[in-house]
Each structure stands twice: as C-alpha cells, then as structure tokens.
Amino acid sequence: MDNNAPACPVCRITAQPYFNDIDYILECGRCGIIFDMRSSLDKKYYEKERSTHVDKDKIRSRERNVSQRAALIKGFLYKEASVLDIGCGEGLFLKEIKRYVADIQGLEPTEFYADYARIELKIDVIQGMIEDTDFPEASFNIITMFHVLEHFQDPGMALGKISRWLKPGGCLVIEVPDISSPYARYKGPAWELIIPEHRFHFTLKSLTGLLQRHNFIPAITRNRDFDQYRVGIGESMRKLLPFSAKIKKSEKVIRQTKIKKNSPHKEGKQYVKNIRRSAQLPLKAFLGWLVYKFRRGDYLFVVAKKTR
Ligand SMILES: [Zn+2]
C-alpha cells in the first residue's frame, strides 16, 4: 500500500477521488464514506467564532425545521424518556420536544448558542465538544444529532461514546447531508453542502453501514429537506426532476458571487421583493411538501436502535 496516499479515516485503507478532477474529496472503496481532506477540527472556530448574534428570520426557519423533525420521531418519544441533543445549537429542538419527555439535556460547543439556550429557553446545556465530554454509562434513552456527525474528525469515537451513554434499547436520531440526493448529484462538486467544515459525506448505504459497525440498527430512514419556505422555487423544481447522472466534473465549482450595490431605490426594491416573496409562499410550501413526500430532499434522516 502506498503510505502517502490518503486513507479512509474509518477503515484506514487507501481512498480514491470521488469526483474525477478534485483531489481533496475522496471515497473509501470499502465503507463508501466520502471525506474532505481540507477539513480539520478548529476548536476555536466552533467555540467562539461560529455564531455571535441571533438572526430572527433564521430562528423562525429553524423552528419550522425542528417541528418537522419532532413530528418524524414522535413515535419514539415517551413520558419517562431522557433526551440528549448533541450540537443542540440554540436549543430549539429540545424546546420543541420538552413537553413529551421527562428530561432534556443539550451539548453544544459554541458559547453563544449554549448561552442562548440557557438564558432565553431555560434549557440545561453543557458547553463543549464531544471529544472532551463524558456522561455516565446508560444516561439517556434518546440521543439526537442533527447536522453534527459530518463535522466530527472521528465519527467512530463519537458513536462509541453515544452507544455507551444510551440505555439498552435506546435510540439514536441522526440527520446529515446526503451526497447521493438527486440535487447533490445534479450539482456535483458545486453542491452547497460540500464545504471544508464538513469532514464527511454520507449516503444511505455508508451511513447505515457505519451505524451497523457500532451496533445500531436503522428503524427509520428517509430524505427530507431544508425549511421549505427558504428553498427557492427553482431549487425545489430541480429536486423534483428525474434523476440526473452524477456530475464528476469540477467546471461547475466556480461560484458566482453577487455584488451588492447601494441603490437610492433600495427600500422600494425591498418592498417589491417582500411582496413577491409573500406571493410565492404557497407555491414554495407546496413544492416543499412534494420534495418531502417524494423523499427528494438533501438531508438523510435516520432513527437507529442500539442493539447491545
Ligand atoms: Zn472506509
């Protein structure tokens, strides 16, 4: 084996480029995990720089998002359950499910989010990274992780800890970007969720394989999407179109940056823009529903049961 060739962080065997002419995104031939060589664990970024203010629009959008997630796991929630949300952000998901369970706990590396959850939502949040955190064995019935697993440097270590923290028969709920979604295939390397912050990219097959290695058996698997009101009409339409062949070219990587101009008619334009946006809402909601219904979304949502 070539010692200089990049190896799969999970299997330690040599990996191959996933896209034809991009050398930093590699795929493991054994476990199918795709990983980005550019990423590294930047604790300072996660702890301090990630967020410093609340965007009210974003909060509203996230609230719609968490209510959809909560609806998907309703059947797994019960009065006596204790729940840990890893990477809980502002604590919106825990706030949403609080009334259905006995006990909620958040773990969040970003100081600003952890403080927001504690002060604004009165949720018990430990500020820290999973690498530096430990709970007693069998502390929780349900552990949730939304858009977190793809950031870890060592997902095996994380899943080992989670398995230990879960009670026998406990559930792990995961949501990650799905690099094999119709839209991701269409966009190729230009897909918006391929960013250096995302160390790993999963498909249903590689995610369930990884979970099974750590003694989790998937009970629910499905695709869902961003908040439907924030996804553009064109993007939703594209997601609903028949499968496109996987693009293995990098020519689409060049992203267009919009230059903001200060115009004297800015306020008027904003007003027209707002009206247009409200008029589009029913259509956006309908398309979002179709994307959800036909499982064409960019997110992979999995509920897995601990087997031992
Ligand atoms: Zn591998």
Image (cartoon, rainbow, N blue to C red):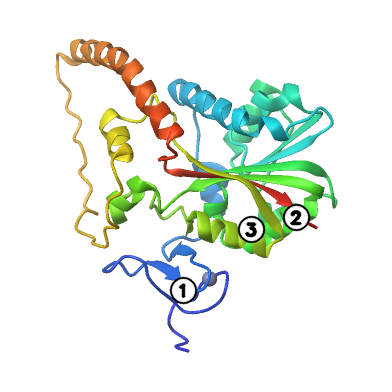
Disc 1 Cβ-to-ligand 1 distance below 8 Å = yes
Residue 75 occupies quadrant: top right
Comes first in the chain, label 1 or label 3: 1
Comes first in the chain, label 3 or label 2: 2
Across and down, in percent, residue 104 comes to 75, 32
Q: Is residue 147 left or right of residue 268?
A: right
Residue holding disc 1: 29
Query: How many discs mark residues in the rendered view?
Result: 3
- Residue 289 visible in the snapshot: yes
Is disc 1 surrounded by few (<14), some (14 to 19) or many (20+) residues within 10 Å? some
Q: Relative to 269, is 299 above or below?
A: below
Q: Which mark is residue 38?
A: none
**Which is more foreground, mark 1 or mark 2?**
1
Instruction: Classify the position of the C terminus by image quarter.
Output: bottom right
Q: CA distance from mark 1 to mark 2?
A: 26 Å
Q: 238 or 116, which is in the foreground?
A: 238
Q: CA distance from mark 1 to mark 3?
A: 17 Å
Residue holding disc 2: 163
Identity, as a three-letter code, of the amino acid under mark 2: Ser
Residue holding disc 3: 211
- Residue 190 visible in the snapshot: no
Across and down, in percent, residue 142 comes to 74, 41
Q: Secondary structure at mark 2?
A: helix
Name of the residue lying farthest toward the bottom: 1
